[in-house]
Amino acid sequence: MGNCWEKPVKEEEVLVKFSAPSSEVPKSSSRDVKSSSTSTQTMSSASDSVSSENASEGQILPYANIRVFTFNELRSATRNFRPDSVLGEGGFGCVFKGWLDDSGLMGSKSGSGMVVAVKKMNNEGLQGHKEWLAEVNFLGQFQHSNLVRLLGYCFEDNHRLLVYEYMSKGSLENHLFRRGSTHQPLTWSIRVKVALGAAKGLAFLHNASSPVILRDFKTSNILLDSNYNAKLSDFGLAKDGPTGDHTHVSTRVMGTFGYAAPEYVSTGHLTVKSDVYGFGVVLLEILSGRRALDKNRPTGEQNLVDWAKPYMGDKRKVFRIMDNRLDGQYPMKAAWVAATVALHCLSLDAKNRPHMNSVVETLGKLHDISELPRPRPQKVVGNLNDNRPQMKCNSVNNQSYGHSSENDPHKDCSKSARNSR
Ligand SMILES: Nc1ncnc2c1ncn2[C@@H]1O[C@H](COP(=O)(O)OP(=O)(O)O)[C@@H](O)[C@H]1O
Ligand SMILES: [Mg+2]
């Protein structure tokens, strides 16, 4: 296994980057306090047209619970960034499993002390610094049960690293789309739990006194702990929401194909409702076990939202979008309610999308709808599109499309890169 440094960027996974709409949006934020022991003055960028003093730009803001690590400490914590300890990879770089001593202060021998995840920027230059800074400044200020905890960072020469709490079940993406003995299909109740946890994380950000727009909400950025509690991660593209009379923030369009809200892609106008659209896509992926975009599927099914929309609001048709790997083991009514929530989030007019508070409220009631169809004794192999819950379905359908080696902790990071922050 090689390292993560010299990898080609996969074209189709690169962030969407269009030219920026021009209007300046003035803002003031409680996060504008500047104080830092490190010299990051050169890092502010004028490329995004919001204030240059928001949390993604300028300086590292002071947060009491964040520890500053040296590069050597993190090198020893990860056993010199051993390739076999890679947990995953995104556009920023590889994420390694590491160990700190019990006080959380120093690297310790592998297998002893506290397990952490260490994200390391994948090039020696300053590219990616802005995303790194946004993570420090956004995640560093929050503590919430549905946001991954940032424990510290390293900012030394050209090294940019982040240290997080370790999420032992990895990303939701892996659980939904990877096949193999290590990834059994998620049950209905776990899917509901994960969707609800992710919704709560997003609601928390949107309800903050200075609302935060995550901007890159997707399954690879939703991490799961040992009890399948969902926590949002990857704040590299996060933005302060509009303040005062402003209805939106104008930015370069960045995010991930398939998840970005249509009005954001076409105008660059970003609001919390852009995240709500992304949530709709993720909820649909959770229900269907299909990727937002999947070129391996037949034409007409490659764009999940376009394919699923006609079925989502119809009680009699919604079974068609449900994941075969659920084997029909879900309450039909609950599936329909969840699909209706997703459809609402996917409204083309952003104003018609719900606030995340109401999404949390509705998803919170899904656990109460519990009647499952009686399992059929034998597998029925037939029409692969027929996902009716009464029927046990052949999971071949999903296997042929869903397999992915992305984020495979065992893969050679030097050979392929995911650049979908
Ligand atoms: N705290 C963590 N615990 C366990 N795995 C993690 C953790 N953070 C990230 N990962 C893994 O690494 C992948 C990439 O992490 P992410 O923060 O999204 O990186 P990037 O900013 O490069 O996109 C995730 O999808 C997940 O598989
Ligand atoms: Mg990511």
Image (cartoon, helix red, strand yellow):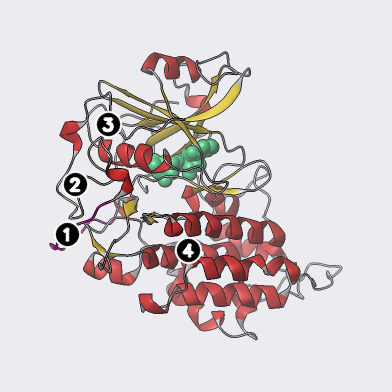
The reply to whether dot 3 and dot 2 touch (C-beta < 8 Å) is no
* Magenta region, residue range: 16-28
The reply to whether dot 3 and dot 4 touch (C-beta < 8 Å) is no
Q: Residue 5: which quarter of the image?
A: top left
Could you tell me the amino acid type at mark 3? Ser
Q: Nearer the viewer, residue 158 or 80?
A: 158
- Residue carrying label 2: 52
Marks 3 and 4, the one that precedes in the sequence: 3
- Residue 61 placement (x, y as % from top left): 32, 35
SS state under label 1: loop
Q: Which residue shows up at 66% across the image and 42% down it?
A: 182
What secondary structure is the stretch in magenta mostly built from?
loop
Q: Residue 112: which quarter of the image?
A: top right
The CA distance from mark 1 to mark 2 is 15 Å
Q: Nearer the viewer, mark 3 or mark 4?
A: 3
What mark, if any, has residue 36 been given in the picture?
none
Marks 3 and 1, the one that precedes in the sequence: 1
- Residue 263 placement (x, y as % from top left): 29, 71
The reply to whether dot 1 and dot 4 touch (C-beta < 8 Å) is no
- Residue carrying label 1: 20
Q: Residues within 10 Å of mark 4 (few under 14, many from 20)?
A: many
Residue 345 is inside the magenta segment: no
**Residue 112 appears left or right of 117:** right
Could you tell me the amino acid type at mark 4? Phe
The reply to whether dot 1 and dot 2 touch (C-beta < 8 Å) is no
The CA distance from mark 1 to mark 4 is 24 Å
- Residue carrying label 3: 35
Residue 17 is inside the magenta segment: yes
Marks 1 and 4, the one that precedes in the sequence: 1
**Residue 379 appears left or right of 209:** right
Q: Residues within 10 Å of mark 2 (few under 14, many from 20)?
A: some
